[in-house]
Image (tube, rainbow, N blue to C red):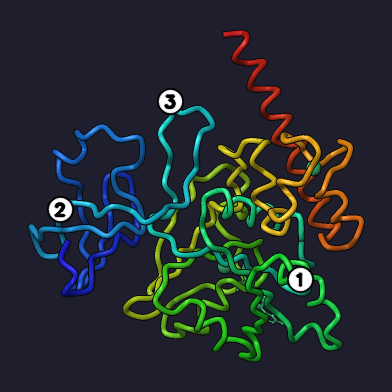
Amino acid sequence: MRSDRPPNVVIRGYGQYYDVLTPEGVLRCVVRGSLKRERRKTDIVAVGDRVEVRRVAPGEGVIEAVAPRTRALSRRARGAEDAEQVIVANLDQLVAVFAVAQPEPSLPMLDRFLVIAEAQEIPAVVCVNKIDLDGDGTKRRLFDPYRRAGYRVVETSALTGSGLEELWSCLAGKLSALAGPSGVGKSSLVKAFRPDLDIRIGELSEATGRGRHTTTVTSLIQLDEQTFIADTPGIGTLGLWGIEAGELDRCFPEFRPYLGACYYADCRHLAEPSCAVRAAVESGAVDCGRYASYRALLEQLMEEERAEGWRRSRR
Ligand SMILES: Nc1nc2c(ncn2[C@@H]2O[C@H](COP(=O)(O)OP(=O)(O)O)[C@@H](O)[C@H]2O)c(=O)[nH]1
Ligand SMILES: [Mg+2]
Ligand SMILES: [Zn+2]
């Protein structure tokens, strides 16, 4: 693909149609027939893909080719027989947004997002918003374990503008997905960078606002020529699919220095003797809240694996 001009980026998908941002504006595109006939274990085109398009009419085009993806955030089935469903292609990082208050932060949910990012090898950043509600500075301390685990933690207030420069330095030139519960200020942060856009503040996402299952639509918001935010209501519903119980420990970066040191090579760090991870928790080197999340997620994965083994045995 030519690199002497800004590439065309898929910013939204609607069934068979994709909106592609080109230097000449947005084109509503279909996918070339011969591309569709290639058998692939992944979506042919996804939001975030860099593509070659041919304009066929004003505002309309055909996607002729798709550049190889650097990485993708996807829904994966555990079995290799099912294709993955790409949520965002070429994602540079996941930004997990939580508030110090209103709503109170759910650290187990943060841990889940971080595990999903680690498992899919997507760099993750934590954004702690609404620091204007943390007058005495105590609530933001809740996020210290994440700094110690090696994550970048950016403190912001979309209300006062505090920390927005640091957040910008972390977003600039990248495609980032914002993930976080509703009400933490994701839309407000995006609006702070693009006040001209019609971004709704204080609205429930479609997925939670309606009492039924809705297909989650991902779209890209352009902050500047090379900076994009993926508005992905779907991340909240991402299961831990595709993660095996035995690889969960690696998804906690601060556990990694200890992983070779347990007595049993396949130690799950529960009740096994001479467990280096548990020893690190007891000495305070590993945060006990993070370890509690590990146990809860492991429990869930082992439960899923048991259920799956049972289903398979009945086939
Ligand atoms: N105090 C305070 N309120 C904020 C901040 N950012 C957003 N809000 C408010 O929090 C509510 C939810 O914001 P919104 O951006 O819609 O959150 P989203 O659901 O994550 O997109 C709105 O009433 C915002 O005005 C902040 O930094 N400080
Ligand atoms: Mg919002
Ligand atoms: Zn262990």
Residue under numbered circle 1: 143
**In the image, residue 117 lies at what x, y percent?**
57, 55
Tag 2: Cα neighbours inside 10 Å, few (<14), some, or many (≥20)? many
Q: Secondary structure at mark 3?
A: loop
**In the image, residue 275 lies at what x, y percent?**
84, 43
Between disc 1 and disc 2, the foreground one is: 1
Residue under numbered circle 2: 62
**In the image, residue 87 lies at what x, y percent?**
44, 50
Separation of disc 1 and disc 2 at Cα? 46 Å
Separation of disc 2 and disc 3 at Cα? 30 Å
Q: Secondary structure at mark 2?
A: strand
Which of the 4 image quadrants contains residue 173?
Answer: bottom left
Q: Amino acid at mark 2?
A: Val
Tag 3: Cα neighbours inside 10 Å, few (<14), some, or many (≥20)? few
**In the image, residue 122 lies at what x, y percent?**
51, 58
Residue at point 41%, 47% (across, down): 86
> Which labelled disc corresponds to residue 81?
3
Q: Sequence order check: which comes first, mark 1 or mark 3?
A: 3
Q: Is residue 315 left or right of residue 226?
A: right
